[in-house]
Image (cartoon, rainbow, N blue to C red):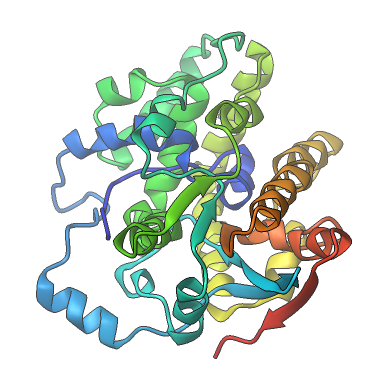
Amino acid sequence: MIQPAAAAAPAWHATAFYTWALGAALCLCLLTAQAQTPPNCPPQAQAPTAAQMQAAAGRARDRGLLWRITRDGRSSYLYGSIHLGKLDWAFPGPQVRAALMATDTVALEIDVGDPQMLARLKPPGDSAVPTLAPALRERLWRQSDAACLPREVLAALHPVMQAVTLTVLAARWQGLDVGYAQEFVLGGFARAGQRRVVSLESPELQMATLIPRDAAAAERMVEQIVAQLEQGKAQRVMTRLADAWERGDLDEIGNYEGWCDCVATEDDRAQMKRLNDNRNPTLADGIDALHRDGKKVFAAVGSLHMTGPKGLPLLMQQRGFTVERVALR
């Protein structure tokens, strides 16, 4: 069920880390498995032993955000997920497990367990590749060295994806690793139980959302991400958001823009809207269509998609569902 790996996908300032799907950089970042891990390197997730798995399963408890959505005499579920994790988060608690068992289809932003999906995660063909200024390139290399990621591996990626990769690798210092992301956990649970796994978005949409087509805009994005890494802000934001997710604290997650120190300008707000709110109708339509087709759906998407007046719970209510929050203890 669990496939620890060293990689995934935050983005703009670190805002996109939880608003944007895990899979966008995963196929590229798996290359980091080539990296050496001397003592001064951040820890990488290793395949757990049977004893570790058994102990973690014994500690399983409910985490995250869960809603029951009912229409046409059938219930489906919305689950606010997280795109990084740790071994103890790899086992659903009793209420989340019961919701999974009551459904026949698991819907993810992107099914990262589907090799065909991963193969399509490429920068848009019409996006310009910026030539980074030498000073910015050197700053990026320093972050690569700190992550113990070989420079030749990083150089194979689009510059924006280089910065994105380094941001997620920095989370390893806080004990958070993409190998334990909920997408892996839930996809593995579904496949083990012979349930269908579907993607609510296309890889092309995911990448087009992240990668600016303008070279100057792409370089600005890289500089902003690097600055966040240098100041330690990206790691602090990821840790705070992960803690809020573990507690199921919807208010804290919903106030993300108030404490992330990442939405300061009109451009920032427009980018946040594009990465989060603008994608929600497509996600809601996909869940609606599956339910209308007779499926009982467990839809897991990043927790920020559950917040605000354009969040998925309200969008599903507008589509005729009765929506009720399931209290997780």
Q: Residue at x 34, y 57 (%)?
A: 191
The percent position of residue 28, horizontal first and vertical second, equals 36, 30
Classify 324 as above or below 281. Answer: below
Q: Nearer the viewer, residue 256 or 226?
A: 256
Q: Residue at x 36, y 64 (%)?
A: 189
Q: Residue at x 60, y 65 (%)?
A: 80
The percent position of residue 292, horizontal first and vertical second, equals 71, 55
Horizontal side of 102 relative to 265 (left or right) equals left
Horizontal side of 73 relative to 177 (left or right) equals right
Q: Nearer the viewer, residue 45 or 317?
A: 317
The percent position of residue 97, horizontal first and vertical second, equals 44, 78
The percent position of residue 217, horizontal first and vertical second, equals 68, 20
Image quarter of the C terminus: bottom right
Q: Looking at the image, which residue sits at the far bottom? A: 329
Snapshot quadrant of residue 94: bottom left
Snapshot quadrant of residue 162: top left
Classify 201 as above or below 120. Answer: below
Image quarter of the N terminus: bottom left
Classify 118 as above or below 212. Answer: below
Q: Residue at x 51, y 84 (%)?
A: 95
Number of numbered discs overlaid on the protein picture: 0
Q: Nearer the viewer, residue 307 or 197?
A: 197
Horizontal side of 44 relative to 307 (left or right) equals left
Q: Nearer the viewer, residue 75 or 66?
A: 75
Snapshot quadrant of residue 182: bottom left
Classify 185 as above or below 162. Answer: below
